[in-house]
Image (cartoon, rainbow, N blue to C red):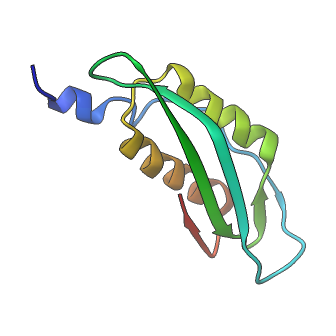
Amino acid sequence: MGYNERHAKSGITAPLPDIETFPNQYKGYEITIEIPEYTAICPKTNLPDFGTVTIRYMPNKACLELKSLKMYIHAYRDLGIFYENAVNRILQDVVKSCRPVWATV
């Protein structure tokens, strides 16, 4: 049995914890956060997926608060979502939380 639309969309709109922020005090610098303990569940096989997530961004008025970011990433642990979709969802949520000058995941 192959992949289907349900597999492809799994987890994309799942509720996840908010990523908190704090006021940025400086301008014109880059932040890199490497998270080696990312895990999720493959929506097709139900097997665990492991990976490293690297977030790079230039803050504008707010910076990501690391404890809430860790709790946010931890929430993926029991979520059925493809890694490729998770990367895009993480980027979307990072941008929504801190409105950076730019960001990559």
Q: Is residue 21 above or below residue 102?
A: above
Residue 22: percent from left, percent from top: 84, 56
Residue 6: percent from left, percent from top: 21, 27
Q: How many marks?
A: 0
Looking at this view, is 37 or 94 the one in front? 37
Point 51% across, 19% down: residue: 78
Identity of the residue furthest to the left in this view? 1
Q: On the image, which quarter does residue 39 sit in?
A: top right
Residue 12: percent from left, percent from top: 38, 37
Q: On the image, which quarter does residue 7 sit in?
A: top left
Point 11% across, 26% down: residue: 2
In the rendered image, the quadrant that contains the N terminus is top left
Q: Is residue 63 left or right of residue 35?
A: right
Point 70% across, 55% down: residue: 33
Identity of the residue furthest to the bottom in this view? 28
Q: Is residue 9 above or below residue 93?
A: above
Q: Is residue 105 left or right of residue 26?
A: left
Q: Is residue 87 above or below residue 72?
A: below
Q: On the image, which quarter does residue 69 sit in?
A: top right
